[in-house]
């Protein structure tokens, strides 16, 4: 179950807890009271739940394509309704971030994740009995989306509390589950849809989510649960803190930008003469690069600093959209685009929660990260529709220049926000922060 070999474990096991400026002594003591392998089980379980939840989101396109081209082939309005389901799942993932973070901190990471897993399985079962797209919007989009929202934040942040010196690597491995889940579940869903049906693929998905998710939930925990906090202790004045507001704005810009290239790059490549099969391979390259980027960026954060890694990731993602995307009209440059964007955009997800821990403390990481996710839900809802509106403008349907500029500006805005917070922490460029 553990994704490490002995050498990796030896590296992660470094107990230099004195190097962290955001871990309280009580938390450090709690870590020491648990067996060392506990932290690796936490990583493995969170990795698995991230893969199960987000992997299904990434594989929805397989079911959508089959329904659009076979079941609702001559019904354009129903096909249009299908297009909202992916957005609903993505939106719900972020919308429930703040309540999920607070429930996890005040009540239980494990129990909340178990509830989320059950809701995801129920959503898939209900979806398997739907005959109309609007029904799928409710079951697959909203019900399943609520389940994702309950597990995503807690599983993204739980491993960070178990590490100090190797916190970045631990978090990077955890969130890499998103990319690995997509790589595994998408072809599995394709096989199930072609050999059985969409309905049975959803029922089988519900079964492995419930079985693997329930087992994984048992190991999701944090070193110490703060029983003195309550829901009433949330301080809305946090938004008056400049660092807090700037970090929230950064997350908003990234969320609005992140998914758009994955959605429209295949269409961009096809309009420039690249086959749809090759375009899907290029997107697969981006997904693989994303998984690698999450691990490598997390690892680098342990050495060059979390805030430095965050600034670097956002900057390169911005450059890839503004300077590489417009010229990615052939396979060679397309591979470069997939590698650069996948690696750096994926790497962001490793260091964003770590930056929150650096700036605001590890004790409130789940609730703070959840708050940022909820704020950015608007960005998740606006990203693709605004991009599509730009693409519908005169000339943009073939050039995509307006869209690449739009996404590049969003990444640049996030880059500026990260630079502002980095400068507020230390103005010396050579400092490891």
Image: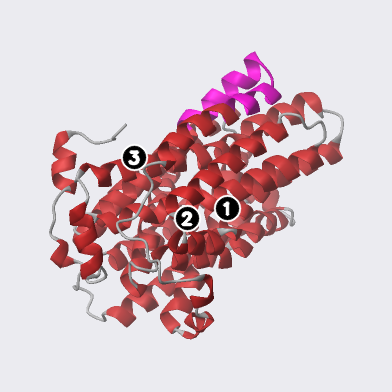
Foreground of the two, 363 or 198: 363
Q: Is residue 331 above or below residue 424?
A: above
The picture places residue 67, in percent across and down from the top left corner, at: 74, 29
**Residue occupying image coordinates x 54% and y 33%:** 279
Label 2: element kind: helix
Q: Pointer 3 and pointer 1: residues touching (CB < 8 Å)?
A: no
Q: Pointer 1 and pointer 2: residues touching (CB < 8 Å)?
A: no
The residue pinned by badge 3 equals 44
Question: Colour scheme in the image?
Answer: secondary structure
**Residue occupying image coordinates x 42% and y 34%:** 215
335 displayed left or right of 297: right
Q: Is residue 58 above or below residue 393?
A: above
The residue pinned by badge 2 equals 153
Q: Earlier in the sequence, mark 3 or mark 2?
A: 3
Residue furthest front in the image: 227
- Residue 144 sits in quarter: top right
Spatial CA distance of label 3 from label 1 is 21 Å
Q: Earlier in the sequence, mark 3 or mark 1?
A: 3
> Which residues lie in the magenta part?
183-205
Label 1: element kind: helix
Foreground of the two, 167 or 295: 167
The picture places residue 229, in percent across and down from the top left corner, at: 44, 71
Label 3: element kind: helix
- Residue 2 sits in quarter: top left
Give the numbered dot on residue 93: 1
225 displayed left or right of 299: right
Residue 256 makes an appearance in the image: yes
Which of discs 3 and 1 lies nearer the camera? The answer is 3
**Residue occupying image coordinates x 46% and y 32%:** 212
Residue 289 makes an appearance in the image: no
**Residue occupying image coordinates x 57% and y 60%:** 256
């Amino acid at each position: 179950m553990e994704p490490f070999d002995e050498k990796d474990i030896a590296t992660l096991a470094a107990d230099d807890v004195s190097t962290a400026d955001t871990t309280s002594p009580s938390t450090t003591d709690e870590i020491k009271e648990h067996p060392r392998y506990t932290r690796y089980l936490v990583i493995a379980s969170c990795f698995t739940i991230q893969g199960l939840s987000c992997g299904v989101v990434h594989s929805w396109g397989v079911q959508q394509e089959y329904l659009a081209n076979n079941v609702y082939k001559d019904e354009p309005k129903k096909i249009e309704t299908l297009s909202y389901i992916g957005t609903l799942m993505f939106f719900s993932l972020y919308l429930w971030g703040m309540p999920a973070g607070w429930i996890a901190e005040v009540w239980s990471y494990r129990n909340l994740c178990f509830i989320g897993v059950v809701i995801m399985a129920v959503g898939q079962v209900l979806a398997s009995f739907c005959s109309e797209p609007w029904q799928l919007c409710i079951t697959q989009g909203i019900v399943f989306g609520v389940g994702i929202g309950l597990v995503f934040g807690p599983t993204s942040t739980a491993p960070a509390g178990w590490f100090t010196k190797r916190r970045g690597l631990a978090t990077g491995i955890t969130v890499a589950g998103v990319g690995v889940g997509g790589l595994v579940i998408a072809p599995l869903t394709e096989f199930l849809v072609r050999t059985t049906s969409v309905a049975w693929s959803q029922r089988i998905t519900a079964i492995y989510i419930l079985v693997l998710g329930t087992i994984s939930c048992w190991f999701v925990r944090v070193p110490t649960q703060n029983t003195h906090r309550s829901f009433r202790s949330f301080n809305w004045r946090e938004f008056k803190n400049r660092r807090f507001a700037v970090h929230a704005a950064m997350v908003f810009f990234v969320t609005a930008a992140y998914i758009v290239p994955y959605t429209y790059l295949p269409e961009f490549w096809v309009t420039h003469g690249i086959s749809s099969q090759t375009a899907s391979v290029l997107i697969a390259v981006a997904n693989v690069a994303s998984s690698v980027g999450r691990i490598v960026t997390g690892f680098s954060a342990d050495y060059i600093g979390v805030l430095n890694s965050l600034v670097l990731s956002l900057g390169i993602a911005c450059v890839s959209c503004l300077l590489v995307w417009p010229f990615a009209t052939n396979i060679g440059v397309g591979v470069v685009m997939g590698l650069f964007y996948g690696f750096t955009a994926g790497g962001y997800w490793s260091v964003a929660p770590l930056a929150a821990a650096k700036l605001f403390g590890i004790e409130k990481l789940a609730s703070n990260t959840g708050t940022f996710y909820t704020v950015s839900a608007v960005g998740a809802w606006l990203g693709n529709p605004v991009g599509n509106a730009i693409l519908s403008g005169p000339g943009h349907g073939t050039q995509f220049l307006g869209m690449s500029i739009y996404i590049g500006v969003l990444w640049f805005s996030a880059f500026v926000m990260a630079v502002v917070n980095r400068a507020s922490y230390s103005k010396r460029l050579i400092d490891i922060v």
